[in-house]
Amino acid sequence: MRMQRDCSSILLISMPFAGVEIPSIQLALLESYLKERDVEIETRHLYLKAADFYGLKNYNTLIHPPNDSYTSQMVFSKYVFPDYWEKNIERFKEYYNRISKEQTFEEYVKKTDNFYNFVISNIDWGRYDIIGFTLNYGQFLPSLAVAKKIKEFYPNKKIVFGGSRTTGELGINTLKIFPYVDFVVSGEGEEALYRLSIQSANYDQIPNLIYRKDGEIVFNNTTSQMNLNLLPIPLYDDFYKELNSVSAILKEYFSYQGRLPVEISRGCWWNKCTFCNLNIQYKGYREKDVDRIVEEIDFLSDKYEILSFHIVSNILLLKNMGVLCKKLMELGKDFSFFAETRAGRLKSFDYALLKKAGFNVIQTGIESFSSSYLKKMNKGVGVIDNIAALKFCMENGITNEYNLIVDYPNEELIDFEETRRNVELIEDYIDPPNLCNLRVLYGSPIYCNRERFGIKELDFFEIDKIMFPREILEKGISFVYSFKVKEKS
């Protein structure tokens, strides 16, 4: 392909601690969008390499319950805040020993050193004009660590961050705190990254871009939305290239557990749950046309010889769900899908159709079996809706992976009692839940309206107090908070 001469060459990276069973759809979508416009781009799914360096079992232990990917990134503080690390290494060690018995802290640090040094020394950074990092829950410190070192070697390279972890004020504060990050894309990144790749681009005209100008931080906030039907099909070639370079055990793991992500919508048509911040980077709700969804799944299945897919959208289609299922069935392939949905809207026959189409695992936003609790969460459903969703899944052979949230800021004893009674009544007919303590997430309605929820004050999360110097936290880069409630009179 002949590339445009007036466009920069781009490298996009997804660092640990992403799950190795699902490629980064962010990289795949951006790559296909930019290649369609003749931009020279490569992507690296470096979380696969990390899993090899740590060992697959160790890596999965670090990122899956009872742990999570957010905690696992803590060792990368060593490269971002080296003086702070040296002074507080015993605190890091003590916390790590509480969450992992698979490998010692010293092994964890050594393997991280080996991975970090491999990344820095084995990528030809000089080839690229723009180096971008996609940041989700547990990728902030690893991305900062590599970006910092790149900037030391190549001060003229443009470093770009994007993803939910750097949305809005988080992105603005990232530029204020870390001078080696040049740009943040807050929101949809396809058009922003393309325009940034045009070397003569006027930054003022780039949507969703946060950048420095005359000593100030500028945010080109926009209400524009991408037409999902016009986006190209995501490219996973670079993921499979990365996969082919790792150990046989990791390849085998993906062959059994791997799923390709597919996007069917952006945003959430409900978007009122008080604890949720999953869609802070999107403005409004949009769906792809059914025919386009089916075309993508069919194409990806053939191209990559895979039948397992992960619907990354936060909710199943509001419209034409039945039509989608029937058209997927007409393809005559033995698909297996994972998807998220809401209770209350789908009936028993809908779940039967989902099962026939290959939706074997669903995560329903249950959260509670207490009617007053659900009202506090503004879920828009009742207890009977939640029970029905789980019952219909079990009757149709669909595994339902759902959460029950506890420790809500305005919870009462009656909420616990109602949930306990309902669980005792239905426990033989439902899948067991995952229990989750509430965390106040940046941008969620609780975060934005603390007074209404009886929150006295927010506090930095325990692991954040270990990973980050206090003065950095106080500048506003935390994604998750603990909280103290007001005493009731």
Image: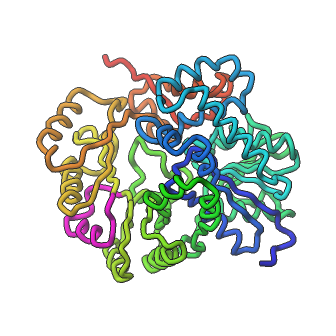
Question: Where does residue 68 sit, x and y in percent of width and height?
Answer: 48, 38
Question: Where does residue 449 sit, x and y in percent of width and height?
Answer: 46, 36
The verdict on residue 346 being magenta is yes
Is residue 185 visible from the viewing direction of this image? yes
Q: In this picture, is 474 found above or below 131?
A: above
Q: Nearer the viewer, residue 473 or 393?
A: 393
Q: Nearer the viewer, residue 448 or 137?
A: 137
Q: Total number of numbered labels?
A: 0
Question: Where does residue 341 sit, x and y in percent of width and height?
Answer: 35, 58
Is residue 449 visible from the viewing direction of this image? no
Relative to 260, is 361 on the left or the right?
A: left
Instruction: Using the rendered view, name the quadrant where residue 39 is placed.
Output: bottom right
Relative to 101, is 337 on the left or the right?
A: left
Q: Which quarter of the image is occupied by the N terminus?
A: bottom right
| Magenta extent | 341-361
Q: In this picture, is 381 found above or below 189?
A: above
Identity of the residue drawn at 38% across and 67% down: 317
Question: Where does residue 292 sit, x and y in percent of width and height?
Answer: 48, 78
Identity of the residue drawn at 81% across and 65% down: 198
Identity of the residue drawn at 32% across and 41% down: 434
Q: Residue furthest left?
A: 425
Q: Nearer the viewer, residue 13 or 26?
A: 13
Q: Which quarter of the image is occupied by the C terminus?
A: top left
Q: In this picture, is 327 found above or below 183?
A: below
The verdict on residue 336 being magenta is no
Relative to 413, is 157 on the left or the right?
A: right
Instruction: Using the rendered view, name the quadrant where residue 327 is placed.
Output: bottom left
